[in-house]
Image (cartoon, rainbow, N blue to C red):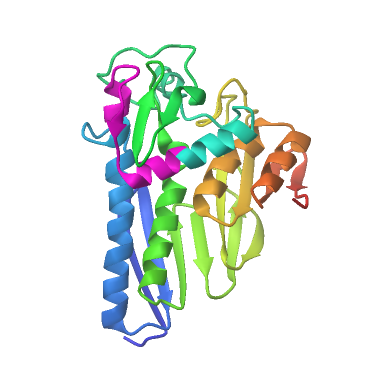
Amino acid sequence: MSAQMIRRARPLLGTVVEIRLHGVAPRAADRALDAAFDEIASVQECMSFHAAASDVARLNAAPAGVWLDVDPRTAEVLALMRAVASRSAGAFDVCVAPRAVDAGLLPAPSARAPDAAADWRDIELGAGARVRLARPLWLDLGGIAKGYGVDRAIAALLAHGVPRACVNAGGDLRAYGAAETVYLRAADGSVAGALELADAAVATSSSGATPTHWRGTRGHAVAPGRSASVVAPQCALADALTKVALALTPTAAQDVLAAFGAQAALHDAAHGWQALARAA
């Protein structure tokens, strides 16, 4: 195989993750790909809602006020979550697992019952990688962890000297080294547009066919048939900010996006595309 392009895919993060490399010899590519997929698998292991030994499951089962040591990557995701939740006034909130369980989207954990009033502010971060919950809650990192896994894979590829790569985890995508043409899908699955992505990330979320409190939003009903595609410097940010773009008014969403150096495009059948972009 030539050093021009090598592609691999594996089932991870609840989807198929594809990694494409350019300009790397096969042996070097194999080492880089193994490292990238290992990083994604570690993110999945740490942040799975389902796995009993994951950091998420341990936190969901922990008594309120007890500090737990977690993987540094889990702590990093929770710190990013707090930044987005704070800036969006809780439009993005990972403490929505009880609603997802009630809707049949997630299985009920065997953990103690959550406090219905608990929210992202009850997730406290200590020195190092220590976390405690001020009140009992069920957290679900599904609205941000997939994008973070993509970021960790990109970091592994860069560390192995790969000059150009693209990591695509079911639509959460990040690329560097050259521009990538990315096709955006509307809520009904149709291709609704395209963009050129260069040294950045994009993620798309859709509200589906019926009104719902979208995964990652708390207290914000999202109208049916809408999709949001966010371009941001990191894929974890793009992943989280799609929920903000869907949940908030365009003006409010623009302010949050600008604070993180991101921009978005909203789509629905009635209005087509609407760009959300503003200088920070």
Which is nearer the eye, 249 or 233?
A: 233
Does residue 22 sit above or below 114 in this rendering? below
**Residue 24: percent from left, percent from top:** 37, 82
| Quadrant hosting residue 233 | bottom right
> Against 220, is 230 above or below?
below
For residue 206, above or below residue 183: above
Left or right: 160 as drawn, with respect to 255 = left
Residue drawn at point x = 46 percent, y = 11 percent: 116
Give residue 199's quadrant in the image. bottom right
> In this view, which residue lies farthest toward the front?
127
Please give left or right for residue 202 compared with residue 68 in the image: right
Check if residue 62 falls in the magenta segment.
Answer: yes
Residue 239 visible in image: yes
Image coordinates for residue 190, horizontal then vertical, percent: 60, 50
Q: Which residues are magenta?
A: 57-78
Does the magenta run of residues contain 80? no
Query: Would residue 208 be seen by someone viewing this image from the given angle?
Result: no
Residue at 33 percent of width and 48 percent of height: 43
Q: Position of residue 269 (x, y in %)?
A: 71, 40
Q: Residue at x 41, y 76 (%)?
A: 162
Q: Residue furthest bottom?
A: 2
Residue pictured at 32% horizontal, 24% vertical:
60
